Image (tube, coloured by chain):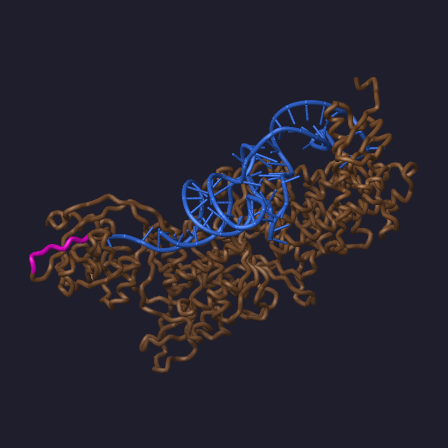
Chain colours: A brown, B blue
Amino acid sequence: MLEKKYNYKTVEEKWHNYWNENNIYKFNPQDKRPKYTIDTPPPTISGPNLHTGHMFSYTQIDVIARHKRMSGYNVYFPMGFDNNGLPSYRFVQKKYNLHTDSMERSELVKMCLNEMKNIQPIYANLFNSLGFSCALDNCYSTIDEKSQKISQQSFIELYNKGEISRKNSATLWCPECRTAIALSEIDTVEKPSVMNYIYFGIKDSDEKLEIATTRPELLSACVCVFINPEDKKHSHLFGKTAISPIYNIEVPIIANPDALMDKGTGVVMCCTFGDEADMQWQKTYNLPIKEAISANGRMTELSGFLSGMKVKDARNAIIEKLKQEKLLYKQEEITHLVATHERCSHEIEILSKPQWFINILEHKEEIYQAGLKCNWYPNAMQKRFLNWVDGLKWDWCISRQNLYGVPFPVWYCKKCGKIHLANVQDLPVDPVKTQPKNSCECGCSEFEPEKDVMDTWATSSLTPEICMNLVTNKGLNDEHLPMSLRPTAHDNIRVWNFYTIVKSLLHFNKMPWNDVVISGYAVDEKGDKISKSKGNEKLTPQQLVEQYSADVARYWASNISIGQDTTFTMEQLTNASKLIQKIWNASKFVISFLDGAPKTEPENLEVMDKWIINELKITQQNFHKNMLKYEIGLALKEVEKLFWNFCDNYIEIAKNRLYKPEVYGEKAKLSAQYASSLLLRGMLKMFSIYMPHITEEIYMDTFGQVNNEKSIHLSGYLQLDDNIDNDLTKLGEEVVEIVSAIRGFKSQNNVSLKTEVENLVITGYSEKIKQVEKDIKAVGAVKNIEYKDGEKNIDITLVFDETNN
RNA sequence: GGAAGCUUAGCUCAGCUGGUAGAGCGUCUGCCUUACAAGCAGAGGGUCAUAGGUUCGAGUCCUAUAGCUUCCACCA
């Protein structure tokens, strides 16, 4: 028997234990049913707690996982933790106040892995307390040995395929972090700057050439001057030689249509490597490479008197000097967009350093095609991916000059410089700690280890393989590809999704997954993303679960439109709490009549019972239609709509037959018992993917016991035929209309709903209404009904009662 | 500058392949009705951003405009 009030605290904890002890959600790879595999995003370990956003997006994934499980799939819903990257590194460094300059890499990795052992249970507890059905007993970490092995194996295989090479090439460089970074790690921010107008000289001429620049400190690296070929004002200069101020370097004047006549003075100086455009020009015009900035963000010797200065100091110093020498004739304050490193917000430089690159530019078309092949939910997200692929300009630089990360399995021969790779069976290796087994072909047996580490995405892009390896132990392997689903937020389209597709194509020429679901953000009333740094998180996930229950939190997180941001308000929580209590109450009512309920459909079902069963069929169809599109919120609304219809209208009708078989007949009672329990069972199953605790509690107290079932979550949805009877729907609508009219009339006359109706005149309704006369009479407390033809109308006369006056 | 999405009741949002505007919350009124007063019933409230077009008929399709959001590009 269910208690009067639903006590979520004890109930939720009870089922968590039960689910874990009985391995309810355990994935069995041997199971013959079709698999549904999820490439779960591993949460980044960058702080001691999870936030609202995690709860929001992982709930949606869990709803999908539960739905597929209920639909008969063998569902694999793994979980991992991402601690291979700067955020985790920074977190540990800060927490223990580490001086990492003097640390060994392996030591640091060990510390990060240890720290994860502290954090992981906290994350796992929250996941558990939210009722997530993921495999928390077998998680991966993106820096653990297995992941390192797969990541290094991927490197070796792609190297052997010729898809990876070490090139001395332009690299996006963060002087603050002192590492190369990828295009996807860049944020562009608007910053104030100064446009400096300076004079260049012309060889064998007294003419002065006016040039505008925001980066005068790069003057020493100036290799040429561009002028638009259409530019008549400057056309006499083509083929001549310009002389840079201060350094007096002679550089050619070249016609270049990229030089815009209306920008600056129309004359551009090109400094390798000032920015991306300079880079392109360097390649196109085969210009010499001159480096004015070094890896630590200071000026090189090339810059002469600026040498050793930081970029900004150098800029001020050279402006001073230009002013002194009267080579600077104008300055303008401007704001412009600057590329910055998203992790540290420092301005990016472009340097030429030897780095490891994965070929992506030459695979652009294949990647584009893969984007087309993938099912994106919502579909508009596909465009974003394709746009990104279209705009690719760089190969994927996977080396980072960090201490922390997955090392390259690479050594260089000290004598001839030849690249030596580790053997796959020896992985994972740290080249700093070990040496190749054989000496080099040149006879040398001394090696220099590659000290760089791989970009974190070089490993994260292998999560399909890392996930499946947890159960198959087959390492880098394509048996499981494509996985069914990659769920993620939209900020990851051009990063994690992109790189995963790249790796999967390069390794196996296969799609990593069939479907990609992009979730929106949880936002506050103003539309700002809820995050700890913004301080707009009203309740932590833990508080939410404690104060409102996991089911309430989950309801809020699943009541969404796919890809749309969802506002978090306290009202929504109240709403969900009410729905849950209502489910409890309605269930109590239905269950109290479960004794003696027919297990199979009785003959001669009452019309209104047929009607509500018909409504259940319609709802199930709509529910599944929406779930197929991953519209979990719309599917939920379908069930809710049915549920309220069931409570407000059907129960009120069935009540009378259930309470008074002596008046309405035993058969009519059996009919209502059958229909109400079928409805409850069907609705609980659909609700179960959103609110797994309360539904389990009710189900296992009743229906589950009949067939000794282990859990509602393994019970599957109701199998109903799909014969929809539209006439029944119409009839039901008419009945609801009539009942509503009676209720409204009583309401307007300020009388209780149980006040009897002396006479009810129904005009213009279908003949069939007569079939449900006794139900209408019962629910409206109507003594007599008259039927008339004509324009639709309902006329009500109440029984005269002194107490009503 | 390029791309995508959004603009429907006071608020948060549904409205699939075109056919007389929907839900929840909030507001107002009434009701202790053998599941539920943290409940129930009822009422009010919208020229579906704007302007054109296609159509017998458009919130729904097409074109343009405006506002908001996001992504990309723009460092001389």
Horizontal and vertical percent position of residue B3: 43, 54
Horizontal and vertical percent position of residue A286: 25, 68
**Can see residue A792?**
yes
Q: Quadrant of the N terminus of chain A?
A: top right
Q: Is residue A424 above or below residue A333?
A: below
Q: Quadrant of the C terminus of chain A?
A: top right
The residue segment tinted magenta is A205-211
Horizontal and vertical percent position of residue A356: 38, 67
Query: A446 or B39, which lies in front?
Result: B39
Q: Is residue A249 above or below residue B18?
A: below
Query: A234 or A171, which lies in front?
Result: A234
Query: B44 or A311, which lies in front?
Result: B44
B41 relative position to A671: left or right: left
Horizontal and vertical percent position of residue B10: 54, 32
**Can see residue A42?**
no
Of all residues, the one furthest to the right in this rendering is: A662
Query: A196 or B46, which lies in front?
Result: B46
Indicate the quadrant where residue A582 lies.
top right
Reply yes or no: does residue A207 show up in magenta.
yes
Reply yes or no: does residue A5 show up in magenta.
no
Q: Is residue A108 above or below residue A740?
A: below
Which residue is rendered at x = 78% and y = 38% of the image? A765
Which residue is rendered at x = 46% and y = 62% of the image? A499
How many dots with numbers? 0
Which residue is rendered at x = 64% and y = 53% of the image? A627
